[in-house]
């Protein structure tokens, strides 16, 4: 079941999802996947206010930039979290929930500069703080100036207590969906161990096999294949439908959960993915068009020279910001 936005107008009439008019007493209900493999839909996330779907995610009145939601392409930004405190200590982290280092914070902010001109309508992160910090810090640099808001609908009370009642505020917001399925691979009995000491104890080859083979798990942990079975499934079920509907998406996650997703996007073999390494805090841009993903590399910063990893419509979108700032 895909994550989806549905309308619950005060009246019984259905509203066309493409409606870009403002309606009163319309509560936008955001339904996102539950934290379980059965992906049953959450309770509604009522955003009180009189907004229509397309105005929530695609229109930023403060910049009066309207992004054509029916454009034939969507952008997908993938970003591995910035350096974490256990990365710095060279410890196996896996699903342990540790924050970013100061350098990791700086990496996340620099990543935000690099994607500051690429539209973002919805953000997906893992359930781990290092990915969530990276997404939130990156968005502080974004030219849309929208506020990313983590969706809390893990309970009826969470849904009620996090309700937003301002139409204008809602339009200036970007939903952030956290999903354990995007967590780093679970490194089992290696979690917390020093990588260098582990290689000395078990041998470099064995540790390399645990870290980079496709189907050999670390002791009582997940292989990349096992990680892929949850991360890629989640991507297909909940993220791809957003892209298909014309939404621009950012995914902030981890080295291995993203390696498994890139294996799917780039159609890599289990041998090719072995050689795939992702640096911390470097954004990767894909364009989704007609059901296909095209890698556009890593966007350079707005002040850097060089060929921007842009398409024509993204270049037009950026130009509007440039014109507004002159
Ligand atoms: O979980 C970890 O230790 C790192 O995030 C990824 O580790 P790896 O590069 O050894 O897979």
Image: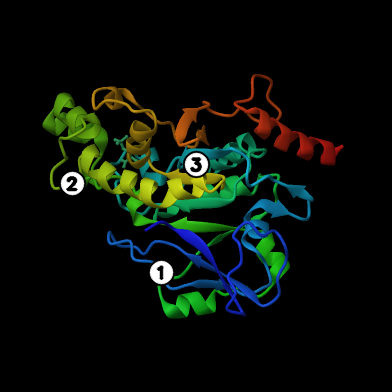
Q: Position of residue 58 (x, y in %)?
A: 66, 52
Q: Quadrant of residue 311?
A: top right
Q: Is residue 245 above or below residue 315?
A: below
Judging depth in this view, the residue of 190 and 126 nearest the camera is 126
**Mark 3 or 2 closer to N-term?**
3
Identity of the residue drawn at 61% across and 80% down: 11
Q: Secondary structure at mark 3?
A: helix
Q: Secondary structure at mark 1?
A: loop
Q: Are marks 2 and 1 in contact (CB under 8 Å)?
A: no
Q: Which residue is mark 1?
A: 42
Identity of the residue drawn at 28% across and 49% down: 230
Quarter placement of the C terminus: top right
**Mark 2 or 1 closer to N-term?**
1
Identity of the residue drawn at 48% across and 39% down: 79
In this view of the protein, can residue 131 be seen by the observer?
no
Taking the view exactly as shown, the residue that stands out farthest to the top is 306
Q: Quadrant of residue 167?
A: bottom right
Q: Position of residue 318 (x, y in %)?
A: 72, 35
Q: Nearer the viewer, mark 3 or mark 1?
A: 1
**Mark 3 or 1 closer to N-term?**
1
Q: Secondary structure at mark 2?
A: loop
Q: Which residue is mark 2?
A: 221
In this view of the protein, can residue 325 be seen by the observer?
yes
| Colouring convention used in this rendered image of the protein | rainbow
What's the CA distance linking mark 2 and mark 1? 29 Å
Q: Which residue is mark 3?
A: 104
Q: Quadrant of residue 275?
A: top left
Identity of the residue drawn at 29% across and 22% down: 272
Q: Position of residue 310 (x, y in %)?
A: 62, 28
What's the CA distance linking mark 3 and mark 1? 32 Å
């Amino acid at each position: 079941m895909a994550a989806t936005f549905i309308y619950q107008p005060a009246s019984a009439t259905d509203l066309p999802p493409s409606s870009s008019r403002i309606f009163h007493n319309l509560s936008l209900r955001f339904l996102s996947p539950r934290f379980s493999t059965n992906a049953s839909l959450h309770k509604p996330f009522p955003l009180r206010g009189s907004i229509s779907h397309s105005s929530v995610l695609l229109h930023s009145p403060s910049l009066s930039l309207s992004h054509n939601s029916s454009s034939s392409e969507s952008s997908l930004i993938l970003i591995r979290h910035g350096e974490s405190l256990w990365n710095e200590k060279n410890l196996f982290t896996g699903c342990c929930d540790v924050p970013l280092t100061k350098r990791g914070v700086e990496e996340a902010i620099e990543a935000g500069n690099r994607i500051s001109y690429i539209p973002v309508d919805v953000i997906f992160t893992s359930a781990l703080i290092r990915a969530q910090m990276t997404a939130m810090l990156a968005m502080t640099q974004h030219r849309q100036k929208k506020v990313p808001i983590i969706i809390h609908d893990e309970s009826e009370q969470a849904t009620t207590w996090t309700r937003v009642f301002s139409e204008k505020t809602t339009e200036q917001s970007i939903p952030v969906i956290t999903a354990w399925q995007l967590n780093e691979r679970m490194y089992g009995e290696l979690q917390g161990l020093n990588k260098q000491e582990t290689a000395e104890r078990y041998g470099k080859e064995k540790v390399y096999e645990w870290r980079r083979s496709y189907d050999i798990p670390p002791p009582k942990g997940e292989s990349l294949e096992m990680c892929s079975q949850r991360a890629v499934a989640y991507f297909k079920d909940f993220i791809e439908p957003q892209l298909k509907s014309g939404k621009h998406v950012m995914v902030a996650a981890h080295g291995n959960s993203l390696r498994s997703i890139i294996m799917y996007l780039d159609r890599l073999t289990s041998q090719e993915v072995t050689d795939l390494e992702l640096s911390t805090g470097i954004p990767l841009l894909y364009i989704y068009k007609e059901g296909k993903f095209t890698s556009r590399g890593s966007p350079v910063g707005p002040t850097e020279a060089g060929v921007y990893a842009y398409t024509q419509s993204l270049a037009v979108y950026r130009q509007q910001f440039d014109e507004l700032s002159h």
